[in-house]
Image: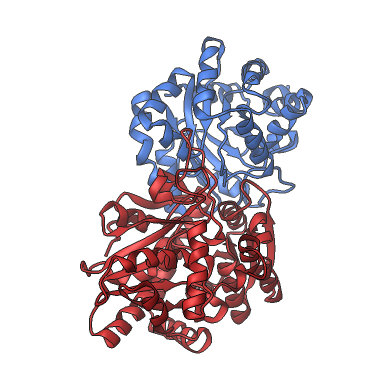
Chain colours: A blue, B red
Amino acid sequence: MSRLTQAIENVTAQGDKAFIPYIMAGDGGLETLKPTILTLQKLGVTAIEIGIPFTDPVADGPTIEEAGYRALQAGASLRTVLEELQTFRDDITVPLVAMTYLNPILAFGVELFAIEAKEAGIEGLIVPDMPLEESAIIHDALRVAEIDLVQLVSLTSPAERIAKITAASEGFVYAVTVNGITGARQAFHEELSAHFNNLATYTTKPILAGFGISTPAQVEQLGQLGSGVIVGSKIVDALTKNDWATIEALIAASKQSALRA
Amino acid sequence: MTTAQKGRYGRFGGQFVPETLMTALQELEVAYNDAKQDESFQQELAYYLKDYVGRETPLYYAEGLTKELGGAKIYLKREDLNHTGAHKINNAIGQALLAKRMGKQKIVAETGAGQHGVATATACALLNLECVVFMGAEDVRRQQLNVFRMELLGTKVIPVEKGSATLKDAVNEALRYWVTNIDDTHYILGSALGPHPFPEIVRDFQRIIGDETRAQILEKEQRLPDAVVACVGGGSNAIGMFYPFVDDEAVRMYGIEAAGSGVDTQKHAAAIHDGKVGVLHGALMYLLQDENGFVQEAHSISAGLDYPGVGPEHCYLHDIGRVQYPHISDAEALEGVKLLCRTEGILPALESAHAIAYTAKLAKTMSTDELLVVCLSGRGDKDVHTLIEALGGGQ
C-alpha cells in the first residue's frame, strides 16, 4: 500500500474522514510555502495537495485561477516549487500530492520531474488535463519513482469508464462532485450519494470528494459519502486572508469521531 | 489519410482534457461518425452550403496580381465571398447541424478575429440555437464590428479580460463554460485545434475548400497547381485547402505563420517556427512556451492568427516535411493588403493578407507557366479600424 493510501486509511480506521487541503504554491510568495505546510500538518490534515500555477488552468475556477496568477507573478513554477519543498523536506510529515497541468511536466522532462518530485516529498500526482487514456505519457516515470497517479472520476463518467478509472487510480480515487470547474458551490447534485454508492461497488480504494466543497457542513456531509474530502478554493481564499479559524473549522468537520464523542 | 491512430497525427493531437469532458468528446465522436455516413445529413449540409452560404466559391484567376509579380499564374480561392465573409461558416454550419442532431440546443464558441464568432452566431440564428461566444477583451476592442454583428444575431458575447485577453484566453473560458454546461451545450470549436475529434471534424467541414479548388483548377488548367498557399493560425482554412492535396506529391504546400513584429522578437505567433512540443487546449502540438512550460502570449496584427499553438495535423505535416511553414510579419501582411487592393480591387482579411504577402515572394521565384493557388480565407472589412491605425487614415 502506498504511503498516500496508508495515510488516508489510518484516518478512516479511527472513524474520522480524510481531509486534504489544496494550496496554491507561491501565492503570497514562495517563502510562505514552508509555514503554510507545517501549520496545516500540525492542524491534523491527512495529506496536502500542492497546486502548481499554470498560465492556462482550464479546470480551475476564478479563486484558484487568480491565486495561480499571483503565484506566477511571485516566480512560482514547477521547478522553483520543488526546490523550495526540498529545503524543508525533513520537516514534512504528511504525504504531498502535486496538482499540475501537464505542460509544465513535459517542459521539465518527465523522468527528471518524477525523480525530483519524489525527492521533494511528492507522493501523489493529479493532472487535471490528462485523462486516463493519455496517462501513458508520464505513467512509467511515475511508477519508477513510486509516485501515485491519482485519477479523477466525474459525474459524467459512464459505467465502463468508472470501472477503468477506479481500477487504474493510485493513492485514492478523486471523485469530482460537480460538473464544472473548481470553486465554491451552494448546492450539490442531489444524486451524489447514489453516485458514491455506485463508485464503491467498483473499488475498495479510498474515494475522496472534491470540487466545490467550501463549508464545514459540506465537509461533514460529503465526507460521509466516501473516505473524505479535498477542499481547494475555500482554503486558498482563507490563506489569502490569513483566516486560519475558517481552515480549522473545515478540518474539525472531518474529525467525525470527535464530533460523535 | 494522416489520421494514424484515434485522434493522433503522428505524435500530435490526443485528448488532453478534464475527465468531465471525456464522455462528451466520445459522444461527439460517435455522433459525428454517424452523421458522416448519413446521406440525409450530408444533403442538408450541402443544401445550406449552396443556397445559404453561396458555395461553391470561385477560383479566380488574379490576372492583375499575376502581372504585377511577373511569375507564377495566380489563382485566388475566394472564401471571402462566403456568407459572413470568411471560410469559418463552412465549419459553423456543419457543427451547428451536428449539435441539433445530438439534441443540444445551446452552443458555446470562442472567437479571435470574430469571424468564427459571427459564423457561429449566424448558424445559430439560422437553426434556432442559443449561442454564447467568448472573445478576448483585446480582440473585442480590435474587432468591434464583428462584436456588434454577433449581438445583432442574438448571440451573447462575453469579453475575456484574463491573460493576454486574446484567442487563447477565449478558448480557456469556452472550455470552462462547456465543462460546466456539458448536459445541454455543444462547443463549436472554430479551428483545427483542440481535443480529438475536433481537429478532424473541423478539417472535414473545411476540406470543401480544397475539394472545390482541386476540381476547379483541373477544369480551368487541366492539371493540379504547382503551389498552394494558405495562412495558419490554428490552421482551419489551411488544412481544409491542403488536405485534398496531401497525396499529390508534386503540389508544394505552404502554410504561412504570423511573424508579428518578427520571429526574433518575443512578439509573434509562429508556433511551428519557434515553438516546442507541448499540450494546450486538449492537444499535443507545437506551442509557444517558456522553459517552465508556461504558455507565451502570441502576437499578430491579425486577431485570427494570434494563437500560441497550431493544429496537430499541421504539426504532423511539418514533421514529415509535406508542408512548409514559413512566416510573414505584420508589416509584410500590411503590404499584402495594399497589394491585393491595388492589383485586384479585393480587400483581404489581415489573416489572408499573410498568404498574399508570401505569395508575392513565392510567385516571383516561379516560372510563368507554373500555377499557384492562394486561399483568400476572408475579406478585410472587419479590419478597417486596424488598418486605419496601422496605415494612417485617408492614405
Q: Is residue B58 left or right of residue A41?
A: left
Residue nearer the viewer, B76 or B141: B76
Quadrant containing the C terminus of chain B in the rendered view = bottom right
The image shows residue A228 at horizontal and vertical percentages of 60, 32
Q: Looking at the image, which residue is at 56% across and 51% down? A: A155
Q: Looking at the image, which residue is at 41% across and 36% down? A: A106
Residue nearer the viewer, A259 or B75: B75
The image shows residue B56 at horizontal and vertical percentages of 42, 85
From this viewpoint, which residue is outermost toward the bottom?
A: B51
Residue nearer the viewer, A103 or A166: A103
Q: Is residue B308 left or right of residue A177?
A: left
Q: Is residue B138 left or right of residue A146?
A: right
Residue nearer the viewer, B112 or A166: B112
| Residue A245 visible in the shown view | yes
The image shows residue B373 at horizontal and vertical percentages of 35, 74
A145 shown above or below B314: above
| Residue A132 visible in the shown view | no
Quadrant housing residue B324: bottom left
B92 shown above or below A63: below
Q: Looking at the image, which residue is at 52% across and 50% down? A: B261
The image shows residue B345 at horizontal and vertical percentages of 51, 80
